[in-house]
Image (cartoon, rainbow, N blue to C red):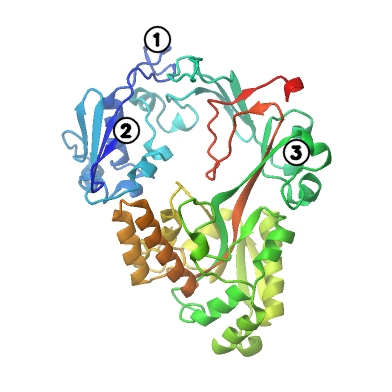
Amino acid sequence: WEINEDATIYTFKMRQGVKFHDDPCFEGGKGRVVTVQDMKWCLDRLCAYDVNNRGYDFFKDRIKGATDYYEATKKGNKIEGGCSGIKVLDDSTIQIELQQPFSGLLNLLALPFGYCYPPEAWKKYKEEMRIKTVGTGPFMMKAIRENDAVILTKNPNYWDKDKDGNQLPYLDAIRWSFIGDQKSELLAFKQDKLDFIYRLPAEMVDEIIDIDGNLLGDYKKYQYQEKPSLSIQYYGFKMSEGRFANNKKLRQAFNYAIDRKKIVDYTVKGAGVPANHGMVPAAFDRYDYKSVKGYKFDPAKAKQLMKEAGYPNGEGFEELTLQINSGGKRNEQIAEAIQSMLKANLNIDIKITKMPFAQHLEAVETSKTEFWRAGWVADFPDPENFINLFYSPHIPEKLTDKSYLNTFRYRNAKVDDLYDRAQKEIDETKRNELYRQADQLIIDDAPAMPIYYYMDRRMLQGNVKNFPQNAMEYRNLKDVYFVPKRNQ
């Protein structure tokens, strides 16, 4: 692809000869060659009205003509040529024109919303495409058994080869198993029924790895991988009304009162990094997260700020309810640890209440709770994903309307300005610096209480090769292969 100097025009050259998977949606069940018109059709659908189109929000006000096309299709009207900002230049070239400079378009197009699929599959399967997928990748869907397994098979028509000319992928098939209990998953792995497991049971970590991440005992025969993840766990404060809304010192007192390192070491057993800096995790190579001055454990400072906030030694501070989502033992353990720390260091009482995740989310997004547990996992590898949570244009006019991203309903004109400038900045170093400045302002205002940045930990059988880890935990299996166990 080519990007013009101000990142307003992206021009893509299509690889020739790539075929869709064989599927009954095609004549004779044989996958046809992908065309540039398929790309255009899929991108136009991203900008069209559909109750199931969750991707439009990523592209509205960005792609030229997207808003007009959306509104027209919402009224049932057709615009000749589709979205005006998406143009087919020739049989192998498509161009996307933006309303203003935006350096992150490639990241958005790499989201599932941007995947290319054939119109034939949509016409045949409609919403069932979730389980009847037709793509172009190295593996094809064989079977989906809800809450049990997903089975993929090798795509014999995949376009790519390795450096020696061997057809990819190497593997004949992949089975992803869904095992609800981590102990059962580990047992299946030890019995050689699984080749790979993601995350370790917290209660067994001490017998699997030491403090430096070295495998212990019988586990030494396996491969261990760990990497900071693009995700964070935090607690949020309601900023629209109530005791936290106009009392920054109260929010800061909470932040100084918790021992993040203790939580990471003893509660989550090393499955994270203490969030002593900003809201952007410690997983970006080119983002200086360490220069963001966050909150380290300081009980004396917490007590002083609590006093300045109007609650000396916790006096006059009525019992506070911490809302968490049910279904996660670790979330409960963290909540109990924080409950204890806030009592010990601020002399306040915290009541923990659990809700099913859907109800929890509903209450948070509609401002029906003032203190809650949350986590965020990046959609794509850019600090924007985390600063975006504090961007005030996301806040609806009415308090009762859902505030999906900025659930805190936090407003700071300087943060908004830095975010807007960063969105238009095409130099990555300069863009990251703008995000870093916004991160510092957010942390100073303390609309949230960052707890820890996640650490992804996984184990592989010794004979699995060429399966590197990445911070997004995206799994590219086209190059993965096995060696005989005797040659591990």
Q: Amino acid at mark 1?
A: Gly
The quadrant where residue 416 appears = bottom left
Percent coordinates x, y for residue 479 in the rendering: 54, 25
Task: Work out whether 377 lies above or below 221.
Answer: below
Q: Position of residue 257 (x, y in %)?
A: 64, 75
Between 447 and 282, the one lying in front of the other is 282
Q: Quadrant of residue 121 in the image?
A: top left
Left or right, 372 with respect to 204, comes to: left
Q: Amino acid at mark 3?
A: Leu
Which mark lies nearer to you, 2 or 1? 2
In this rendering, position of residue 270 left or right of residue 72: right
- SS of the residue under disc 3: helix
**On-image quarter of the C terminus:** top right
Q: Confirm whether residue 318 shows in the render.
A: no
Q: CA distance from mark 3 to mark 2?
A: 41 Å
> Marks 3 and 1: CB-CB under 8 Å?
no
The earlier-in-sequence mark between 2 and 1 is 1
Report how far apart the C-alphas of labels 2 and 1 lie in the structure: 23 Å
Quarter of the image with the N terminus in it: top left
Q: Position of residue 450 (x, y in %)?
A: 56, 65
Residue 361 in view of the camera: yes
Identify the mark nearer the N-term, 3 or 2. Answer: 2
Q: What residue would you read off at disc 2?
A: 42
Which label sits on residue 186? Answer: 3
Q: Which residue is mark 1?
A: 28
- Give the foreground label among 3 and 2: 3
Name the residue: 41% across, 58% down: 388
Residue 159, placed above or below residue 359? above
